[in-house]
Structures are given as structure tokens and as C-alpha cells.
């Protein structure tokens, strides 16, 4: 496994791969890898000859007062995990390599980036789309794998690729959860044992709403209230949002007629957790 720190060096290695007719799958991450990330790597392995993992905590996607400086990092452990997962290349640039002085061009999306997390994190998706576009230009992968855990991010990347004609296939990977149901996230280390226990309400609420939906409830007001009651009971420090949106266009729906996304953002202590579930009929139903 090769580790690259510079844009030029990984670029020439990728070029050599392509000239040899080998396909490349990219898995962009911010490191502090967990089984969710590893599931993306496994998917990448299935579709391409070469798997590249990028590990970069992108300052542009953190707003003022967010957790950039304390974001968990453990590059040695990440490298070991990548090595054990048969990753071919790791790209670990530093800030100066990615944002040259005077960097002033960013990628913005004007519609779907404004809802859900975009409301409380106004610069977040501009930072995400910019770094992902840069990684696509540096690596020029055939495939890139993203987690459904960050559903809005994944949808925006699909939209960017479509709108800007970027020649890469986006693959979505399902949410990996801990045995108790909490969606894996690098940020879970911030939670105290007591906060973590309370946070399990998120998973309970989402799956309970799915059951209600599958028993025939289509009114999103009632479904959102159901989620709200369960989450409120866990005494969260803040409920940022509980929304049900059209899965493709990310607009509010009142009555569910096709697959919808139920998404929540909730704070326990100072830690903001996001999670979501697709409201769609079970196989063989409807
Ligand atoms: P991050 O390092 O948090 O920026 O995440 C990198 C990639 O891993 C993103 O595409 C995330 O959606 C994905 N990811 C993070 N947590 C999970 C999870 N629990 N299950 C599946 N994918 C995940």
C-alpha cells in the first residue's frame, strides 16, 4: 500500500493505473476510520481494480465555532486499517497542499444544500462539494463510494456530478450501525456513556416510524410527531430537525406517495448526531 501526501505524486500514480487499463474507486473520508468507512472500502473493492482512500479533515466544511480543532484524528491507526483492508493507495494531504494560498474558487449548490443540515451549517456543503470536486479532479476515479449516513451530502454529490458533467459513477453504501443501533460516526467518541445511552432514542424513533409507515401511515405530520415524541423523551440538548423529504428532490412532502427520506439531527451534550431512514415499502409489499 502506498501513502501519498502530494497532489503531483498521487496524480502520476493514478495516471499510470489508467494507462494500464485499471479502474479506480475512491473512498473520501476525514479519517478516524470505523466499520462504516470499511464497508465503503469493501464496496469499492468489488467494483474497481484499484481502491484509493483519501483521509483529509477539510477545514472548508467546518463553520466558525464547529469542531474542526478537536475533530478526532489517528493517522497511524487509519493507515493500519487501510493496510488490513487491502487498500492500494492512501492520499493524506495537508492543508497547504489542498488550499493553495489565495484559493478563491468554490463549488456551490443553490437548492438542496439549503435544507436540513444546510440551515444550521450554512458553509458546510460548499466546503464538501469543493473538496470532493478537487479529489475527483486529482484522482479522476471511475467510481466514488459515499455513505447513506450523510444522505444530504451523497445526494448533493450526485447532483454536482450530474450538473457539472463529472465522469464518475457514484455508489451509495447503507448505514452501518453499532450493535445497539447507534449509527457509527467518528464523532461518537465525543459522547459520554450517559449521552450515548440517551442517543439510542434516535435509532428507536426512526425504526418505529418505519414500522408505522409500513402499517399504512402516510401522513408526514403524524410520522414526524411520532419521532419527536420518542426523541423528546430522551431529553436531547437540542433537536435541530426532524424532516421527511422527497428522496430525490429533497422537498417537503405532506403525504408519502413514493420513497421518502426521514432525516434527523439531534444534539446530546455538545455532540450533534445525524441519522436517517428511507420510508419505502418492504420487499413484496404494495
Ligand atoms: P467522514 O469520514 O465522516 O467524512 O465519512 C466518510 C464517508 O463515510 C462518507 O461517505 C460517510 O457517509 C461514510 N460513513 C460515515 N459513517 C458511516 C456509517 N455509519 N455507515 C456508512 N457509511 C458511513
Image: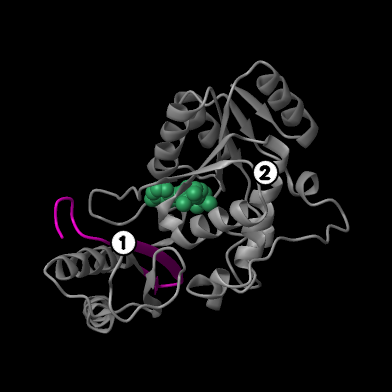
> Which residue is pictured at 33% across the width and 77% down the height?
236
Earlier sequence position, callout 2 versus callout 1: 2
For label 2, the crowd category at 10 Å Cα-Cα, with few meaning under 14, some 14 to 19 and many 20 or more, is: some
Q: Residue at x 72, y 34 (%)?
A: 5
Q: Is residue 140 above or below residue 157?
A: above
x%, y% of residue 124? 61, 66
| Residue 224 located left or right of residue 92 | left
Image position of 144 (left or right of 174): right
Residue behind mark 2: 135
Answer few, some or many: residues within 10 Å of disc 1's Cα (few below 14, many 20 plus, some between 14 and 19): many
Of the pair 238 and 132, the residue shown nearer to us: 132
**Main structural element of the magenta stretch: helix, strand or loop?**
strand
Find the distance from the CA under tag 2 to the CA under tag 1: 28 Å
Tell me whether the residue at label 2 lies in contact with that at label 1, contact meaning CB atoms closer than 8 angstroms.
Answer: no
The answer to whether one can see residue 71 in this image is no
The residue that mark 1 highlights is 277
- The label on residue 107 is none
Q: Can residue 56 be seen in this snapshot?
A: yes
Magenta segment includes 273: yes
Q: Position of residue 268 (x, y in %)?
A: 38, 72
Q: Which residues are magenta?
A: 263-286
In the rendered structure, the answer to whether residue 254 lies left or right of residue 46 reads left
Place of residue 152 in the rendered image (x, y in percent of width and height, measured from the top left):
48, 62
Amino acid at each position: 500500500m502506498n501513502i501519498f501526501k502530494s497532489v503531483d505524486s498521487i496524480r502520476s500514480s493514478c495516471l499510470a493505473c489508467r494507462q494500464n487499463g485499471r479502474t479506480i474507486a475512491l473512498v473520501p473520508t476525514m479519517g478516524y476510520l470505523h466499520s462504516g468507512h470499511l464497508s465503503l472500502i469493501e464496496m469499492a473493492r468489488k467494483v474497481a481494480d484499484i481502491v484509493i482512500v483519501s483521509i483529509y479533515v477539510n477545514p472548508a466544511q467546518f463553520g466558525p465555532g464547529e469542531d474542526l480543532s478537536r475533530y478526532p484524528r489517528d493517522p497511524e491507526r487509519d493507515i493500519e486499517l487501510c493496510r488490513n483492508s487491502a487498500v492500494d493507495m492512501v492520499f493524506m494531504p495537508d492543508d497547504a497542499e489542498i488550499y493553495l494560498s489565495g484559493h478563491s474558487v468554490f463549488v456551490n449548490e443553490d437548492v438542496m444544500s439549503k435544507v436540513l443540515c444546510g440551515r444550521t451549517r450554512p458553509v458546510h456543503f460548499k466546503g464538501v462539494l469543493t473538496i470532493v470536486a478537487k479529489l475527483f479532479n486529482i484522482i479522476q476515479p471511475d467510481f466514488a463510494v459515499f455513505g447513506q449516513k450523510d444522505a444530504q451530502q451523497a445526494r448533493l454529490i450526485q447532483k454536482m456530478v450530474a450538473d457539472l458533467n463529472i465522469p464518475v459513477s457514484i455508489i451509495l453504501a447503507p448505514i452501518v450501525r453499532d450493535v445497539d443501533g447507534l449509527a457509527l460516526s467518528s464523532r461518537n467518541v465525543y459522547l459520554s456513556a450517559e449521552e450515548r445511552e440517551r442517543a439510542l432514542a434516535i435509532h428507536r424513533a426512526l425504526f418505529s416510524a418505519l414500522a408505522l409507515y409500513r402499517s399504512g401511515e402516510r401522513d408526514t405530520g403524524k410520522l414526524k410527531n411520532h419521532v419527536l415524541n420518542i426523541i423528546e423523551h430522551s431529553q436531547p440538548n437540542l433537536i435541530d430537525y426532524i424532516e421527511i423529504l422527497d428522496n430525490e428532490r429533497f422537498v417537503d412532502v405532506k403525504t408519502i406517495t413514493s420513497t421518502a427520506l426521514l432525516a434527523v439531527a439531534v444534539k446530546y451534550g455538545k455532540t450533534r448526531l445525524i441519522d436517517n431512514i428511507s420510508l419505502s415499502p418492504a420487499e413484496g409489499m404494495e
